[in-house]
Amino acid sequence: MLVFPVVQAMYHPIVQTLTKERPAMADSVERRELTFSNVDEIVADARRLAAGEVRACGSHSFGQILHHLALSHDVATGQLIAPSPPLFMRLLMPLMKRMVINAKPLKPGIKLPAKGEAFFWPNKEFEVSEAIKYLEESVENYKTNGPLEIHPFFGKLNQAEADQLVCRHAALHLSFVHPVVIS
C-alpha cells in the first residue's frame, strides 16, 4: 500500500496495525458469519440475540458491543462528537475507506488511540436491555436524520457508502456474540 513516506516512517508500527492482518487473539476466537444489508437487519439480529441467552467471545460483552454500535451511530449522525483521531489517522483513513467499505469482511483487532478507546469502549458493563434500547434509538436517529456528509474518520461518504460502513461495522462486532443453544 502506498502511504506517505514521512507518515510511514514516523508511525511504522501503527501503520502496520492498520494495514496488516493481525494474528492476535481476535482471529482465533470463534465468530459468526454475518452480513447485514441495512440497519433494520442489525437491530433484528441484536433483538433476537437479546431475547435469549448469549455468549460473547473476544474482549467485550454483548452489552458493551451494543453500546459501542449505538455510540458509533450517534457519532456518524453528529449526535455525539468523538475525540479527534491523531493526524496520521486523519490522513490515512480517507485513503483506506474503499478497502474498509468494499473489502472482504472486516478483520478484528484494530486498536484505537487511548482517547478513542476510552470513548468508544468505556471500561464498564452495560445492561443488555438498556444497551438494546440505546441501539434502537441510535438506529432510528440514523434512519431519520441520515449520516453526516463528512464522516468524522473516513471523510466524504455518500448514503450508500455510509450504510455499508454501518452494516459492516455491526457485522464485525456482532459476529462475536453467539446464541446459546440449549439441548
Image (cartoon, helix red, strand yellow):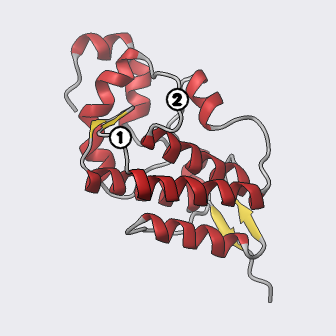
Cα gap from disc 1 to disc 2, whole angstroms: 13 Å
Q: Which amino acid does the dot numbered 1 rest on?
A: Leu
Q: What quarter of the picture does the C terminus occupy? A: bottom right
Dot 1: what SS? Answer: loop
Q: How many marks?
A: 2
Closer to the chain start, of discs 1 and 2, is: 2
The label nearer to you, 1 versus 2, is 1
Quarter of the image where the N terminus is located: top left
Residue at the image position 28 percent from the left and 53 percent from the top: 159
Q: Look at mark 2 in the image and give the residue it sits on.
A: 82
- Identify the residue at horizontal 23%, vertical 24% (top origin): 3
Q: Is residue 56 visible?
A: yes
Q: Count residues near mark 1 (Cα–Cα under 10 Å), then give few for <14, some for 14-19, many for 20+.
A: some
Q: Residue furthest front?
A: 144
* Amino acid identity at mark 2: Ala
Q: Does any portion of residue 61 appear in the rendered image?
A: no
Q: Which residue is mark 1?
A: 148
Q: Identify the residue shown where x is 78% and y is 39%.
A: 124
Q: To which quarter of the image does residue 95 belong? A: top left
Image coords of residue 51 (percent x, y): 73, 75
Q: Residue at x 37, y 15 (%)?
A: 87
State the residue in front, 168 or 72: 72
